[in-house]
Amino acid sequence: MNEAKAREILGEWFLQKDDSLYNNVRFMDWHPGEERACLDADFTADELEAIAWWMRHKGQRND
């Protein structure tokens, strides 16, 4: 998994401009700097892998 693949899988449905992940239809909520995400929907293994990649690599805030 790399950023390009994670972006392809997650797409504009989940990715936010501040690198957070959010969707209110297939509920997911995560913000950089948080260790946990809230998920309440059906996700594929590829989506879960992309979410985990995103959290690990985008989790550090630089502000």
Image (cartoon, helix red, strand yellow):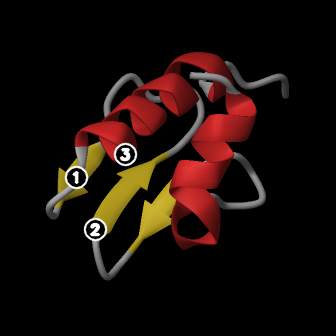
Q: Which callout, 3 or 2, points to the residue nearer the camera?
A: 3
Q: Residues within 10 Å of mark 3 (few under 14, many from 20)?
A: some
Identified at 64% across, 69% down, the residue is 12
Residue in front for this viewpoint, 5 or 42: 5
Identified at 31% across, 82% down, the residue is 25
Q: Are marks 3 and 2 in contact (CB under 8 Å)?
A: no
Q: Is residue 7 left or right of residue 25?
A: right
- 36 w.r.t. 47: above or below: above
Residue 17 in percent (x, y) is at 77, 59
- Of all residues, the one furthest to the bottom in this rendering is 25
Q: Amino acid at mark 3?
A: Glu
Q: Amino acid at mark 1?
A: Leu
Q: Amino acid at mark 2?
A: Phe
Residue named by callout 2: 27
Q: Is residue 13 left or right of residue 16?
A: left
Residue 55 in percent (x, y) is at 50, 28
First in residue order: circle 3 vs circle 2: 2
- Is disc 2 placed on a helix, strand or loop? strand
Q: Are marks 2 and 1 in contact (CB under 8 Å)?
A: yes
Residue named by callout 3: 47
Q: Are marks 1 and 3 in contact (CB under 8 Å)?
A: no
- Is disc 1 placed on a helix, strand or loop? strand
Identified at 64% across, 52% down, the residue is 8
- 28 w.r.t. 44: above or below: below
Residue named by callout 1: 39
Tell me the quadrant of the picture where the N terminus can be found: top right
Residue 61 in percent (x, y) is at 73, 25
Alpha carbon separation for disc pair 2 and 1: 6 Å
Identified at 45% across, 29% down, the residue is 34
